[in-house]
Amino acid sequence: MGAFTRTLAHRSAVVSSRPVSLVLPMAGALLLAALLFPICWMLAASLMPESRLFESRPLLPTAVTFEHYRALFDERDFLVPIRNSLLVSGLTTLVAVPVAALCAYALARLRMRGKGLVLACVLAISMFPQISIVPPLYLILRELRLLNTYPGLVLPYLTFSMPLGVWLLTGFFRQLPKDLEEAAMLDGATRMRALRDVVLPLAAPGIASTAILTFLYCWNEFLFALSFTLGPDRYTVPVAITLFRGRYQVPWGQVLAATVVATIPVALLVLACQRRIVAGLTVGATKG
Amino acid sequence: MPRLIAHATGAALGLLILSGHTLACSSQEATTRLTFSGSALGPEADVVQRQLARFAERHPEVRVELQVTPDSADQRHQLFVQWLNAHAATPDVLQLDVIWIAEFAAAGWILPLDGFESGIDDFLPASVATARWRGALYAIPWFVDVGMLYWRTDLLDRAPRSLIELRQDALRVREAKSARLGLVWQGARYEGLITVFLEHLAAFGGGILDDRGRVIVDDPAAIRALTFMANAVNVDRVVPSSALTWQEEQVRFAFQNGEAAFMRNWPYAWALLQDESRSRVARRFAVAPFPAGEGGQPAAALGGAQLAINTRSAHPMLAAELVAFLTAPDQMIERARLTAQLPPRRSLYDNAELVAALPMPLEQVRPILEAAVPRPATPVYSELSEVLQVWIHRALTGQEPPAVALQQAAREMRAVLVRAGLSTEGPTR
Amino acid sequence: MNHGTASIERAETRLAWLLVAPALAVIVLVSLVPIAVTGWDALHVHDLRLPWLGRPFIGAGNFVEAVNDPRFRAALLHTVAFALISVPLELVLGLGLAVMLHSATRGRAFVRVSALLPWAIPTVVAALLWRFMFDAQTGILAASFRTLGVVGPAFDWFVHPLAAWLPIIAADVWKTTPFVAILLLAGLQAIDPVLGEAAQIDGAGPVRRFFTITVPLLAPALVVAAAFRMLDALRLFDLAYVVTGGGPGSATEPVSLYAFITLMQRLRFGYGSALSITVFLLTFAFALVWVRLLGRSLTGARS
């Protein structure tokens, strides 16, 4: 290739990259705006008085009112679903993560036959459509008198939180250096001791990611909560918001206020732990 | 490390104890406890609390509790079925929608009320008919809802006397631009749609089940009725297409803001429409029965609630006393005054107290009550209704022609009856 | 010596199974047993509201009814069509977002949080949000479409059987594009930049580099993302229930929603179980296909 053609090629490379270097940030900004707009709108609309909501051009909020939030907590006692969601999500996480951690440790670090089979089973089960296990779970919970109770929701929630925990934690444990326990055991510690003193501290970030993701999934869960709770005293947040109805209509102002309130804990979690969350989501992908 | 485990265990235990405590609290027992479950929304809540408290005063050894249920009727229905199917002993007294009584009676979930037979003649016959299953009385009517045609007295001289007049009036008003919409009714895919359809059915002389229990929604009269409704939405456009997502409140808003000349809604709307601070049509409307079409009669869909007793109640006699108390004339008049819900006792309509208590003039209400049309009393009504709702909604949204929709609906409804062992069709059909 | 290592191995295996046992027990109890019971119930008549019918065994009767049920067939069609439309959209948009996340030099945290928020929000909240924005009276998007003349002045999105799908698809794409983006981002970050530089020296423009280097190397991550999304799309429930309730008529009703209505509203547990099992078989069949595909793509990438 002569010097002339080489210069041409270089120049065309430079020229052709310029519009792209503009397009990418612009497209990105558009995408970001599309992602954030509905949330901002939700916030803005929840602060609008009811009458403005029904006008045909509710674009710019002129008046700001906290009426909907007040009604949410005074008339609808929205603290109850929040409490229910916190309890159920917290309990499920506290039960699922430790048990899954033990299993994941074994699958990731110990020698055993049938590892692949167990993992494949776990993955397959996490793919079950939730609706498929609603009928028998409903009947079983009914017999055990656990309908409309906290344990009655934690149990079904284990169907997805356990496989999720095992899958994620196996990935995290695999990422740890291979000879970690060997070094500790050479010093005379038992395997369990090594697990407790050496492995767990290093795996703590991964465990935290798993716990956060488990909590998030439980907080957002809808179908089981809808099927296994019977009354407003045990509704979780998603169910309570969806079933917000006056006798004859949907009170949009209060619904939007409720969605904002339901989003706040999630948003706080995301803000505080976004690295952990991303780590959790990608551990499954990178291990391939 | 051990500290972490200790903390986690402590947290888990704490949460478990908390949830267990909450469980325990909800199952505390005291003196004789009667549980009442029904709708308690807005003014209804006040009335119910008041009357329950009054009953408790007269029966000092009894504590009456109001068990909260979801606001929407469909959810309350689902909840009741799940409780009763699980053989729950509470609630002792249930407020049932008129369309659920046959279902609960046939399943053996509510008690026959033979002790109430003697005084039952005072109640509206149509209401009592919905409370009977296989001849026995299973519930006592508590309040009555009837579908009414609200019309604007400032835009029209008199209420339309036929469906043709209704259509013409609506078109005329829309063309003169005195109101943006002609007629509004509840068109969302829910039970309210069936009540609207029922009125159109009766207006053309049709019905859902005949008196032998056979499905007749594919009869020519029914097809004419649904065609009329579909044309109103899609051809004449006197009914806005958005109405197909509206329930009672959205319909009320449209009329209340002065946008419609006619509204089909329940009595509860009257008091709200008269509120001058919010309503633009205060004192400029009246009510009439939904007019008849060819071969039919003016009709008002019958709704309302009735009180029944749980078969597994631990205190059936006490529950019966509560039912008798709540359905006594005094309580009914108080309810009418506070919630504008019509009492089902015929004698009350000659009572001056009621006339004073009701916000709407009695002479407008009477013809509507006389035109009351009940929905079929069958244990599988909710399933039949759900099938019908889907097909009617498909026809109204233009997905099927009305004739096809009703034929399909009839086919599925017959299958439901056959499956439930309730079919009264001959084998050839 | 041999004897010693063998017994150590056995001890390790025993410990391993001990540690695995609790999790496995829970999974079997709350997932495998119920699905078997659903399958069993699907072979019987079981109507909670008609106790006088009992629970007779009817073999494949419920499944025959399902095959002849036009509403069920329509629901299957809706579900598959929804998956085939929304998943490619999410993959394309997710890839775009991932590229953007990858090449962003400043404000990475802000971008990441903005991307994560829609994914983290409860599905029903997203559904209510999009329902609100498309609502004929109060919806800002509905109003905008009307102003722009895209639809008529009296158009109601939820009354039209096809248009009602738009809010559902929009909500799903909005909510899960970030998830796909994050999955793909990990793949992007694993691509050796040397490859791109070499191609640039050879004169390949950025678009060409993208399609000949980036996309093929991302293939495994794309397949994983596609599989997860496809599985979730086939199980569509929350969005349909909240955004349209399955209406108008039953035009936006996916199989999970129809199964739910049959089970929890009509309380026909036998027939509902048959419908649920069919959903399960559908996703299971797809998962099998995916495992084959994944296996092939992984071995392909390695070679």
Image (cartoon, coloured by chain):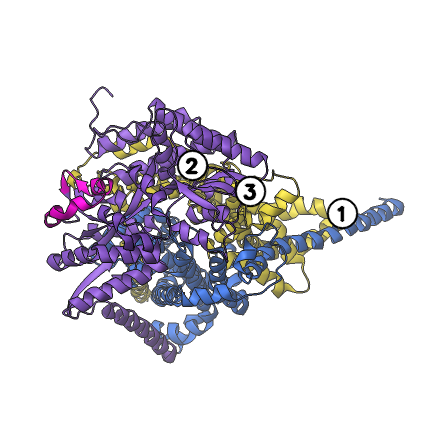
Chain colours: A blue, B purple, C yellow
Return the residue found at the far top: B428
Q: Are marks 2 and 3 in contact (CB under 8 Å)?
A: no
Which corner quadrant holds the C terminus of chain B?
A: top left
Mark 3 nearby-residue class (10 Å; few <14, some 14–19, many ≥20): some
Q: Secondary structure at mark 3?
A: helix
Where residue C21 appears, as percent x and y from the top left, is 29, 60
The residue beneath circle 3 is C88
Image: magenta residue range: B112-136
Give left or right: position of C25 versus A97: left
Where residue B115 appears, as percent x and y from the top left, is 10, 50
The residue beneath circle 2 is C249
Chain containing the residue with disc 1? C
Which corner quadrant holds the N terminus of chain B?
A: bottom left
The residue beneath circle 1 is C202
Chain containing the residue with disc 3? C
The one nearer the camera, C189 or A32, is: A32
Return the residue found at the far right: A4
Give left or right: position of C189 versus A273: right
Give left or right: position of B115 versus C253: left
Give the Cα distance between marks 3 and 1.
32 Å
Give the Cα distance between marks 2 and 3.
27 Å
Residue C183 sits in which quadrant? bottom right
Q: Secondary structure at mark 2?
A: loop
**Majority SS type along the magenta span:** helix
The one nearer the camera, B246 or A157, is: B246
Q: Are marks 3 and 1 in contact (CB under 8 Å)?
A: no
Mark found first going from the N terminus, 1 or 2? 1
Mark found first going from the N terminus, 2 or 3? 3
